[in-house]
Amino acid sequence: MSNLTKLAEQMRQDWDRRVGHDYRFWMSDGYQDDAQMWATGERDFAIVSAQVPNGDDKSALEIGCGVGRMLRTAAKEFGRVVGLDVSQRAIHKARELIGPDSRIELVVGSGFDLQPVESNSIDFLWSYAALTSMPTKVIASYLLEMKRVIKPTGVIRLQVYFGQHMGVSENDTLHLRCYSHENFRRAVELSGMHVSASQELILPIPVSFKEHGVEAVIVTLQPKDCAPEDADAIAQALLPEGESDTTAENAPLDLEAWMTLRYAEELADAGEHRRARQALDYVVSNCRATTIDIRDIIERILAKTERASRTSVRPEPVCIKGDAILLEQNLGVIRERFPALHTRLVTRTGSSEEAIELRQTEQGAVLWRKGACLDHAEKPLSAADTWVSRSLREVRFENASGVVVIGFGLGYHLEKFLEKSSCPVSCIEPSIEALRTALSARDLRSVLSKIQQLHVGGPSEDFRIDPKIELVVRPQHLALDAKFVEGWKAALYGKRGMAALHPKIAVLGPIQGGTIPTGLYTNNALLRWGQRARRLDMSGFNSGFNLVDEFLSTDVRKGMMRNSYVEMLSQLVLESLTEKPIDILICMAQAPISPRVLTELRRRGVITVLWFVEDYLRFTYWRELAQFFDFIFTIQKGECLSAIKKAGAGEVHYLPTACDPYLHVPMNLTAEEREKWGSPISFVGAGYHNRQQMFASLAHYPFRIWGSEWPLCKPFDRLVQEESRRIAPEEYIKIFNATAVNLNLHSSMERDGVDPSGDFLNPRTFELASCGAFQLVDERVLLSEAFEVGSEIVTFKDLPELREKIDYYLAHPEEREVINRRARARVLKDHTYDKRLEEMLSIIYASKYEHLKTREDSSPWSTMEKRSENHPELKRRCQVAAARGEEPTLDALISDIVTGNGKLSETEQKLLFLFHVRKQIIRMTREEAGLKG
Amino acid sequence: MKKRHPHKSKILLVNITRLGDMLQATPTIAGMKAENPDCHITVLVEKQFKEVCSVIPNIDEVIGIDLGFTCRSIAREQDGIIDAFEYVTELVEDLRKQNFDYCLNMSSSAYTALLLNLIGITRNGGWTADEEGYRVIESEWARLFAASVFHQNRQFNSLNLVDIFRCSADVEEHPRKLLINVEPSAKEYCASLIREAGFTNKGPLIALQAGASQGKRQWDPQKFVQLAKILVNEHNARVVLTGSAKESHIIDPIVAGCASPNVVSCAGKTSVPQLAALVEQADVLVTGDTGTMHMAVAVDTPVVAMFLASAFGFETGPYSEGNIVLQPVIGCGPCNPNKSCARPDCHEQISPELMAHLTMARVAGEVLSVPVELADPRRVIVYRSCFDQRGFCDMTPINQVGGDAFARYRSAYRKLWLDDLGGYEVREGSKPEAQRSLRVVESPIDGLVEVAACAEKGQQLIKELVHLVKDTSSPAARLGTINKEISELDRHIEELGFHHGSLGPISRMFIFAKENLQGSDPLDLASQMERVYQDLERRCRKFERYYIDS
């Protein structure tokens, strides 16, 4: 049996089964009754056939007609309508529902061709919500058939999805297939047709595909006068990497089961109990993922349908107490193997908020915490067995170096993991109290002696994380300890991502302002982490941005032109990222990027990140932009995080700025440099209101002020240096080093002096410390989290204190030195850009690991590496070129081959051969063009 | 004739891309077969030219290389590059298995050179590459090929590339024409094409090849129209236009412009074998420098050929006896083949009337002269192709009365190379007083004395170098100085070749020789270098002698 026939047979079986269960649910979005189903059919046919010529003399064909939802409407507009579907049951149902209609022919199709429809016989062909669930090879075969049956003047309309392919396996007949625009167009061209139009389709379901980078469209195809290629070439064009042919069992998200369960719950909520039970029976009978979790849901839904406690699925709980002897025995093992944990267990202070209790079931005790059962409420042993078996079948465990389970429970599942897993098993438990209780409930000595690591609490240095271990989370903890789990995922997958992922990252800087160097430091740190990063430095466009002032005087016009300018720069960024695609875009605050470009990038699967290093109350553009970012990192906490999250950002995290330990360094300055840059007291920064107000009172000090936007009138005329020009980073580092006491007053446009509620820390705080330069910084809410105030850093809260401390520290250079050393040690340990970017990437990788892995595995270089298995040197070249961040071109593979630099390897010669062939053919083609021109 | 590789049994001939090149290789192929009838000759061509090879005699096997697929794969990038790489790998492996013992690559492309190094054939008669990717031309004749087609040097060459090509392959005995097989079925087909063309005239059948490989080499279509009208109206001729379907945009306007039943297009109606048959039917072929011209030579159809723009008759003229070549006299010609031309004034040097005259004269038989009023030698030189007594093709002007500034140099170089590379005795016309001393101390050729002096100095430096190498106590710094002097000397020689155009070929041959030193042993290299300088000095002497004798 050919592969195509096998796939068609799979489709037939699956759809026969689904139609047999509930044809309305599986074949339309109007499942309440047939009337609603026909109404949706009429609605959708109007969309798909808009402006297509119709008439009694015209014929139409639907691929995947199901139960004929759209055919009745089609038959009103076309003289002959053919409905074709692979499912016999669907066609049988269609005949029953439609009844005799001479205009409609219903055909059980082969599943991959349009026989017995004659060639060049159809005026209008459509497929709606059908092709999108078919295997790619089947779609390719249908494209060829469409070309065969459509008349030269005919029109084809297909509902498809554009976006990142979601790794759907070949035999999956339900998951949506997405293709890139370019691949789809190419496949259509190879089929002997062309895409003449493409229109966004707004789907009548409450799911935003766009959030996932998927676009639903109706494409119009028309035949061309050329012969098509074969189906294999078309399939390859659609999806170059092909679909996996592995029949993965029990995928974590068994779509069919979950869809049916959700449907069942809706039916139960709507009072349709019989149908709800039918749906549940369908899941139990047909879906492979009969997991304990699903069983819980099934039981919950059943409970809803029964409505009475006498049919309640749960028995009355029987609470039991722990056994001191068991506890002692178990603690004995822990004392030997995990002494630090033992200490914590025996000295812990319990929390009544945990509401921990043991209950008895037929299969043994179970642990409850905060009202949730941490094992299975009735059958902990069999539930554990099923869960562990299912988990270990996941593909990700094939090459894992270890399993880490979050959630100890009463250890049933750990026993099973230890029994069934070939790699070491560790456990992380959120609650010390829960663990202690567990140790009193069962004899866990066997588990405790075999388990590799046992840890209670969040990520710490004590728990060794190997990038190749796999994390598995007890479902109960997903709800109970969401943040805890998130933290561990970040720790594990972040580390793994740093080791295993090589996404291409672009750092987009602003046109102007103090954040420009932050973009540089960010990029540098990424490069130091071995990431494939590049910086999009937009500062060169600053002069253009400011030149607007020379041409216009009206603010409205200036604003309009500046917006246009920024939009142009945004487009420039998009074009640059089209030429050299990336996986992650990190935008610094005020980077020139528009919502439109961000949307397009996300549609391409790019992860968008904003490092919002500004005061969220003063700069409020995040309100409009937040929704376009997958991640926003802020330098403030509390309300800032919640406000930005509420504005639509994907994830929001606190991440303060930092120092660059390679640039912000102590320097040995020459006497001339000290003369030029030095002073007993200095300040570097813009002349914000509070600074002007406060520093005016320091005019009698030996004080130099550097930076822009300072007035030059008294008393600043003798303080402000170099006519208030902007100071470059390499200059202010010298100023820091040459100054005895650097003042660091955070800016405020409204308040005088020190802002009593000022929270975030400016970069200068870290940069000064990294330079080993002494600073007096105003009190900030978040300062004590970053430094030990008084020991590592000195603060002031008002002008009198500032004066006092200036005097003191000018007179005590040795104390300044001590503080400087401590401050520098602290920032180098905790506050470098390397640290920040590690944290940022860990968060991103934890959340987007699979997405990035899929992109990487399907990236052209990955494909090329796989194809090069038989050519080791070529493979190595691909790896090296990819690591350099090059695009997958021939030029990238030969860029480091130099003639006359020693013997060329055979691979190098072959690559040079290809290079010269291409050059020669291009030259000959140009000659030929000259011939015609 | 001196032979480098006298016995060859499994031969690979690399001639990748053009019909004309393939035809021009036929005397060489025939010669190799004549020398060793048991030898196996394989030709490596671009896939689409495999069809051409079916009409080439003496070829035992044809291997097609699919450059189109390779380029399309590369253009796809990503895994297309892997496809192309795997294709090349397979090709190399297949060629290695053939165990060729000799290769002749007259394609000067870098990729063929790399390919041959990959295959690993040890004896080569043309271009290849070494393991570091440098171009290697072992054969002196192949170097002469490269030196002659070097743009600045072309006008000084009178040796047809067919002869240089065959000498690279050590072929001495060879047919004095190009060769092609014409199938009877092709003949029948073309005969029926002519029969059914609907001609009303009964006169000679004149084939016109209007297209050419480069736009600037195509004579103005309007001139073809005028020519055709003269032939049809004044000479009762039947005119058939040849060419491929791709050339229809050139040919259709000519047919339309003539508006005559006696001017018919067969463009796109013939395969390559059939084109040969069609040209065979014609009484004369009027053409530019095209593959069709070579085809006509191979089927013994008389040719009247215009060598316009970058075409140069001495290089690629009809390899035959008695055919006519027109070479415009214009300061910019022959021009660089890699450059386009917005206004090819050289086309104006040749009138339709002249072409018509020559065509009809060729129909009648031998053309030994042409009226100057039709062919002003200040505007165009009309040549007649011929062979010298050594079997090398040449061209004799039939309208020129002096005036060709390069003629004397060409003659001198011709003798130089035949003598120095071929070992032929070239004594005719040599004047007794031309027996010069070993040193050139004055010369009618600008710059020659200086080049000769450089050659002499080079030999001295080499001697000193050898001495330093052998004497282990000699300071290393002096070795460095000598090497530097040698480099500067070589550069100077090259610059002299640019500065004094007539010395270009000698200088270029010297450069090629220097580029192709083999091995790494210092003394061996020194010995090779010494020979190179000796060759240069000797050639300066000979060149001067032959120039004076001319």
Image (tube, rainbow, N blue to C red):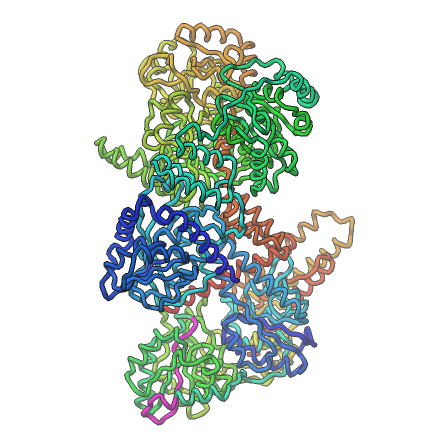
Q: Which is more toward the observer, A473 or B89? A: A473
Which residues are the magenta region? Answer: B194-213
Does the segment drawn in magenta span residue B200? yes
Q: How many marks?
A: 0
Is residue A753 left or right of A318 when viewed as pictured? left
- Quadrant position of residue B2: bottom right
Look at 41% across and 56% down and name the residue there: A87
Residue placed furthest toward the bottom: B202
Q: Quadrant of the C terminus of chain A?
A: bottom left
Residue A643 point in image, percent of width and height: 36, 25
Is residue A281 left or right of A628 when viewed as pictured? right
Residue A351 visible here? yes
What type of secondary structure mainly makes up the magenta span? loop
Measured along the vertical axis of the image, is residue A54 above or below residue A305? below
Residue A747 point in image, percent of width and height: 37, 18
- Quadrant position of residue A401: top right
Measured along the vertical axis of the image, is residue A482 above or below residue A279? above
Does the segment drawn in magenta span residue B63? no
Q: Which is more toward the observer, A928 or A194? A: A194
Residue A757 point in image, percent of width and height: 38, 14
Residue A707 point in image, percent of width and height: 39, 22
Q: Which is more toward the observer, A847 or B129? A: A847
Residue B503 visible here? no
